[in-house]
Image: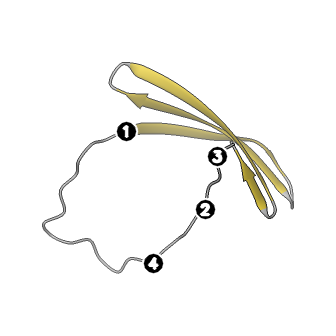
Amino acid sequence: MNKEIERKYAVKYLPKDLKVEKVEEIEQAYLYEDVNTNIRIRKIQIKEAIHYIYTVKTKGDTRN
């Protein structure tokens, strides 16, 4: 089982010389949400390949 650690940072500005390495299209939908649980599905398309990622997040625990 994979563990996910999510960190968020506030960014004041992006560097002018920032180079974009690749672009991925992501669609996301939440299937269920309450105080302790989030269930979502993501559709990620890279060129012609499409991947779906189902994620369940619970308070204090993360599972893919």
Using the numbered discs, state the Cα–Cα distance from disc 2 to disc 4 in whole angstroms.
17 Å
Using the numbered discs, state the Cα–Cα distance from disc 3 to disc 1 in whole angstroms.
21 Å
Q: SS class of the residue under badge 4?
A: loop
What residue is pinned by disc 3?
2
- Between circles 4 and 3, the one closer to the viewer is 3
- Between circles 2 and 4, the one closer to the viewer is 2
- Residue flagged by tag 4: what amino acid is it? Ala
> Could you say which disc has been placed on residue 24 in the image?
1
Coloring scheme used: secondary structure
Using the numbered discs, state the Cα–Cα distance from disc 4 to disc 3 in whole angstroms.
26 Å
Q: Earlier in the sequence, mark 3 or mark 1?
A: 3
- Between circles 1 and 2, the one closer to the viewer is 2
Give the side of residue 47 with respect to residue 28, left or right: left
In the rendering, at what x and y percent does residue 8 appear?
A: 52, 71
- Work out which quarter of the rendered image holds the C terminus and state it: top right
- Residue flagged by tag 3: what amino acid is it? Asn
The residue positioned 15% from the left and 70% from the top of the image is 16
Q: Earlier in the sequence, mark 1 or mark 4?
A: 4
Of residue 2 and residue 31, the one placed in the foreground of this image is 2
Q: Looking at the rendering, which quadrant does residue 40 occupy?
A: top right
> Could you say which disc has been placed on residue 10 in the image?
4
Q: In the orientation shown, which residue stands out farthest toward the front? A: 1
- Residue flagged by tag 2: what amino acid is it? Ile
Q: Earlier in the sequence, mark 1 or mark 2?
A: 2
Q: Looking at the rendering, which quadrant does residue 60 occupy?
A: bottom right
Where 38 sits versus 13, above or below?
Answer: above
In the rendering, at what x and y percent does residue 38 appear?
A: 77, 50
The residue positioned 45% from the left and 78% from the top of the image is 10
